[in-house]
Amino acid sequence: IAPVSEDTMEQTPTPGRRPPLAVMRIMNPVMKTVLRSPLHSPMSKRLIVLSFTGRKSGKKYSIPVGYVQTDPTTLLTATNSAWWKNLRGGAKVKVRLRGKSYTAVTNVTTDVEGLQKDFRDLLADAPQLRDITGVRLDAQGEPIPADVEAARQRGFVVVRITLDRPA
């Protein structure tokens, strides 16, 4: 077990690994189906279905992603998967949130200062992301800058989704 520093509230996390691709190919369609059904409630507190069009291919994508809602029209999600590259430049998306569909616009945060703020908001509401991203909080509840930079170096970004109307 890693030591706990006086500057941090928790042990150094080991960044999580993604489930094997074969597992995701089975689970994603199941999760999308449940999230779009009347049985969505247990899963939709932490998962949305995000639908968008590939920037180069024009292919339609729908993926289940974890989220944190910071206000009635703003959702945040962190990822180090390549799908976020389709959302640069204010991409228009569709969101299935708690049984309702919305149109939305995205903004991708890639800079350290923006990630510092976004990780603060994400980790306050979804502490399980600390294990996935490897970002710890200090005694004041702020993300540790070195952890944020390390997460950025591993390809993590935060996608801010702004809904066209309140959820």
Image (tube, rainbow, N blue to C red):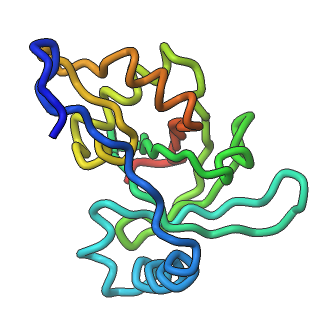
Residue in the image at 43% along x and 42% along y: 76
Q: Which quadrant is home to the N terminus?
A: top left
Which residue is at the front of the view, 158 or 163?
Answer: 158
Count of numbered circles on the image: 0
Where is 14 relative to 65, above or below? above
Left or right position of 156 against 61? left
60 versus 114 height, above or below: below
Residue 107 horizontal/vertical position (percent): 61, 34
Residue at figure coordinates x 47%, y 60% from the top left? 18
Task: Name the side, left or right, on which 67 lies relative to 65.
Answer: left
When asked about the image quadrant of residue 127, the answer is top left
Q: In which quarter of the image is residue 2?
A: top left
Which residue is at the front of the view, 68 or 16?
16
Q: Residue at x 26, y 76 (%)?
A: 41
Residue 118, given in percent of the width and then of the height, sits at: 41, 28
Q: Position of residue 10 (x, y in %)?
A: 14, 31
Task: Name the residue at 52% across, 71% down.
Answer: 20
Percent position (x, y) of residue 115?
A: 47, 24
The image quadrant where one finds the C terminus is: bottom left
**Nearer to us in this view, 116 or 22:** 22
